[in-house]
Image (cartoon, rainbow, N blue to C red):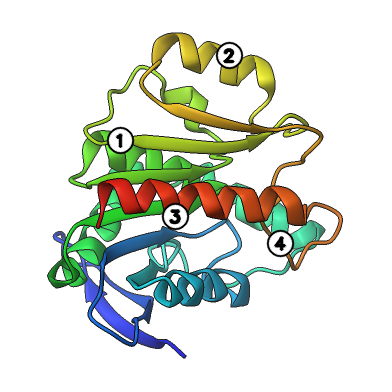
């Protein structure tokens, strides 16, 4: 099981993060960007899975600037509150938190970032504005709004054809602007397809395939 750690961003902001470490020497590190629901059981599970693959994984609480320790439920109110915060965050401030998390695990070796929904957008921006060796985006909600930015590291993106937050037409336009990003498109799959705690969205086949592709990508750029 992982542990909670205290971090500090370059601007003095203190925040929490969940840290999961491999049993043996790490293959590298990975920052895990949370959904808009916070560092919850699902996100901790992802960190543990990455640790099981040999990576030091850390999930910073990216809403701590708004409300410390906020974890939202997967319901109407949780969605409303999550959207309210995520739509109003200062991305530059959040990226300071992300980079602090990356620095904390930098002794593990090369560091990647992987994010989900809100965290997917953060992962894309971190690839463009931060210092990462690779980035994995799972259905980054507002990623396509930032196709004018240029990544500094290799990027892959997972998305379903039924994703209303990242619709096919937005993906198509993004590809025109940023052809260097590799997109994996999953037919008949909704937004949030990796979240096993949300049966109305979860797709086991797509989740397993995305994980396999993510591991292949990390083996290429982080090992």
**Which residue corresponds to mark 2?**
172
Asked whether the beta carbons under mark 2 and mark 1 sit within 8 Å of each other, the answer is no
First in sequence: mark 4 vs mark 2: 4
Q: Residues within 10 Å of mark 2 (few under 14, many from 20)?
A: few
> Of circles 4 and 1, which is in front?
1
Q: Which is more foreground, mark 4 or mark 3? A: 3
Relative to residue 154, is residue 121 drawn left or right?
Answer: right
Q: CA distance from mark 4 to mark 1?
A: 33 Å
Q: Nearer the viewer, mark 1 or mark 3?
A: 3
Percent x, y for residue 20? Answer: 38, 80
Residue under label 4, please give it. Answer: 78
| Real-space Cα separation, disc 4 to disc 3, in angstroms | 31 Å
Q: Image point 22% across, 80% down: which residue?
A: 25
Q: CA distance from mark 2 to mark 3?
A: 25 Å
Q: Is residue 200 left or right of residue 1?
A: right
Callout 2–callout 3 Cβ contact below 8 Å = no
Give the percent coordinates (x, y) of residue 88: 48, 44
Please give the name of the residue rendered at 34% of the width and 38% of the height, measured from the top-left corner: 125
In the figure, 181 relative to 8: above or below? Answer: above
Residue to which mark 1 is pinned: 154
Which badge, 2 or 3, comes first in the chain's sequence?
A: 2
Q: CA distance from mark 2 to mark 1?
A: 19 Å
Judged from the image, the secondary structure of the residue bearing numbered disc 4 is: helix
Q: Could you tell me if residue 39 is visible in this image?
A: yes
Foreground pick, 65 / 59: 59
Identified at 55% across, 69% down, the residue is: 43
With 209 as the anchor, is 47 left or right in this view?
Answer: left
Q: What x and y, as percent, mark residue 135?
A: 35, 44
Q: Which residue is mark 3?
A: 215
Q: Nearer the viewer, residue 73 or 49?
A: 49
Disc tally is 4
């Amino acid at each position: 099981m992982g542990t909670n750690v205290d971090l500090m961003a370059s601007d003095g902001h203190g925040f929490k993060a969940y840290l999961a470490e491999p049993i043996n020497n790490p293959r590298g590190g990975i920052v895990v960007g949370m959904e808009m629901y916070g560092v919850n059981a699902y996100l901790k599970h992802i960190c543990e899975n990455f640790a099981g693959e040999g990576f030091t994984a850390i999930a910073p609480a990216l809403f701590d600037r708004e409300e410390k320790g906020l974890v939202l439920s997967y319901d109407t109110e949780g969605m409303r509150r999550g959207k309210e915060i995520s739509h109003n965050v200062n991305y530059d401030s959040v990226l300071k938190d992300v980079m602090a998390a990356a620095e904390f695990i930098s002794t593990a070796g090369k560091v990647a970032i992987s994010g989900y929904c809100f965290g997917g957008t953060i992962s894309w921006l971190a690839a463009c504005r931060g210092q990462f060796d690779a980035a994995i985006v799972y259905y980054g909600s507002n990623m396509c709004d930032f196709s004018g930015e240029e990544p500094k590291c290799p990027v892959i993106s997972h998305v379903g054809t039924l994703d209303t937050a990242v619709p096919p037409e937005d993906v198509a336009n993004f590809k025109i602007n940023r052809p260097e990003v590799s997109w994996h498109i999953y037919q008949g799959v909704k937004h949030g397809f990796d979240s096993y705690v949300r049966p109305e969205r979860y797709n086991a086949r797509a989740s397993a395939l995305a994980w396999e592709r993510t591991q292949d990508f990390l083996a290429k750029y982080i090992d």
